[in-house]
């Protein structure tokens, strides 16, 4: 199990990395969408936790790019959006962009752990 954390807020990023690392889940962290795409291309991740609002490239664009590249090379990396917006319209935007699920901030760490251990691509929002 390998998780890529793409989050520009250093506090949230550290919290997630600490939380997952302590549970024996390997993670790498980046602070923008472009780095997320580059990191994804160079390694083999099971799950990407993707913040929506990041500098350089946001989470929706990074997800679009990854999904586009996947159509060429195959495979499907589970992408979970990290969003401050719990509005239905934003959830829809995440799913339309090709994300599989989302976590709203402040992050529910129990749900994060559940999603990491029970990855289900395009599972309906709860
Ligand atoms: Mg952000």
Image (tube, rainbow, N blue to C red):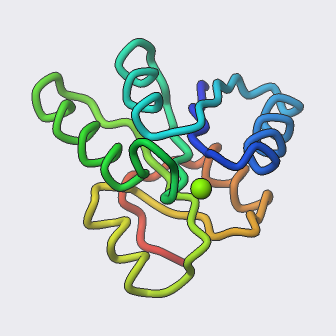
| Rendered-image quadrant of the C terminus | bottom right
45 in relation to 50, above or below? above
Report the front residue among 62 and 3.
62
The total number of labels drawn is 0
Left or right? Give the position of 68 relative to 27.
left
Identify the residue at horizontal 56%, vertical 66% (top origin): 83
**Residue depicted at x 57% and y 32%:** 4
Residue pictured at 79% horizontal, 59% vertical:
110
Residue lying furthest right in this view? 22
Question: Residue 39 at x, y = what percent?
Answer: 46, 21
* Residue 15, quarter of the rendered image: top right
User: Looking at this view, is 86 or 71 the one in front?
Assistant: 86
Residue 81: x and y, percent?
Answer: 50, 57
Quarter residue 71 falls in: top left
Q: Where ligand 1 lies, by quadrant?
A: bottom right
> Where residue 53 sits: x, y (%)?
51, 58
Furthest-bottom residue in this view: 88
The extreme left residue here reads 72
Which quadrant does the N terminus fall into? top right
Determine whether, in the image, residue 1 is placed left or right of residue 74.
Answer: right
Left or right: where 117 falls relative to 56 = right
Q: Quick check: 85 above or below 80?
A: below
Q: Residue 12, percent across and down? A: 77, 50
Q: Residue at x 38, y 30 (%)?
A: 37
């Amino acid at each position: 199990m390998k998780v890529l954390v793409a989050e520009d807020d250093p506090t949230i990023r550290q919290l997630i990395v600490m939380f997952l690392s302590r549970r024996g889940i390997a993670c790498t962290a980046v602070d923008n969408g472009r780095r997320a795409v580059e990191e994804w291309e160079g390694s083999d991740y099971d799950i990407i936790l993707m913040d929506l609002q990041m500098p350089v490239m946001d989470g929706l664009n990074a997800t679009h790019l990854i999904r586009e590249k996947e159509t060429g090379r195959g495979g499907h990396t589970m992408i979970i959006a990290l969003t401050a917006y719990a509005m239905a319209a934003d959830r829809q935007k995440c799913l339309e962009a090709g994300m599989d699920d989302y976590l709203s901030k402040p992050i529910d760490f129990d749900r994060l752990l559940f999603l990491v251990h029970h990855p289900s691509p395009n599972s309906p929002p709860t």
